[in-house]
Amino acid sequence: MIYWEIFLAFFIPGIVGYGGGPATIPLIEYEVVIRYEWMTVEEFAEVLALGNALPGPIATKMAGFIGFEQAGILGAAVGLFATIAPSLILMIVLLRLLYRFKDSPKVKLLSNIVRPTIAVLLGVLAWRFVATSSVESGWIQTGILLVVSYLLLEKWKVHPAFVILGALIYGALFLAPPS
C-alpha cells in the first residue's frame, strides 16, 4: 500500500502542477505533509532546501528522497517514476498524434520551420564552445580536437560516445594543468 501512496503523492502533483518542479512543490507539500503525514513542515522545508542545493529537477530529487525515506530503494524508484510519468505519458500521446498527422501539410510546415531553428541554435552553441575552448586551451589544441573529431565522426563513422570519451582522455592528458 505504501508504494501506491508514494506513487499518488508524486503523480497527482505532476498531473495538475502545470509549470514544472517549482509549481508542483506546494502540491507535493500537501501530499507529503498534510495528506500522508510523512513529515512535518520543517522537515519538508529541509528536504526542499537540500533539493534546491543539488543540480537537476527539484521534484525528482524530492520524490527520490521522500520515497526512499518511506520505503527504501523501491520507494525511491516509485517516487521517481511517478514524478516523470505524467511527462512520459504526454510525450507518448503527443508523438502518436504527431505520427498520425505526419503527412499533414501543417505538420510538415511546422517541421520545416523547426529544423532550421534547431540547427541555428546548435550552431550558436557549437560556436560558443569553440570560442571558449580557444580562449582556455588555445587555437591549436581546439583545432586538433575539431579536426580529429570531425574525421572520426564523418569519415570513419565512430560512435559519438567514443569520440567524447577520447576527447576527455585527450584533455586529461594534454590539457590538464600541471600539479
Image: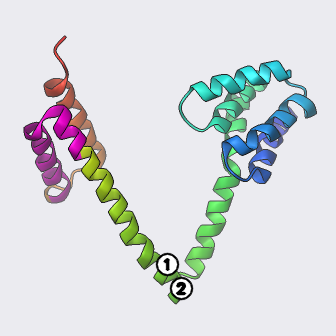
Is label 1 in contact with label 2 (beta carbons under 8 Å)?
A: yes
Question: Which residue is denoted by mark 1 in the rendering?
Answer: 110
> What kind of secondary structure does the magenta stretch mostly adopt?
helix
Which one is nearer the viewer's eye here, 101 or 26? Answer: 26
Residue at x 72% of width, y 20% of height: 46
Give the label on residue 157, or none.
none
Residue at x 73% of width, y 30% of height: 75
Figure check: 121 above or below 41: below
Magenta stretch contains residue 131:
yes
Which one is nearer the viewer's eye here, 17 or 156? Answer: 17
Residue at x 32% of width, y 52% of height: 125
Residue at x 62% of width, y 29% of height: 52
Picture quarter with the C terminus? top left
Residue 152 position within the rendered picture, expressed as x and y whole percent measured from the top left: 16, 50
Instruction: Report how many numbered discs are placed on residues in the image.
Output: 2
**What range of the chain is rendered magenta?**
130-154
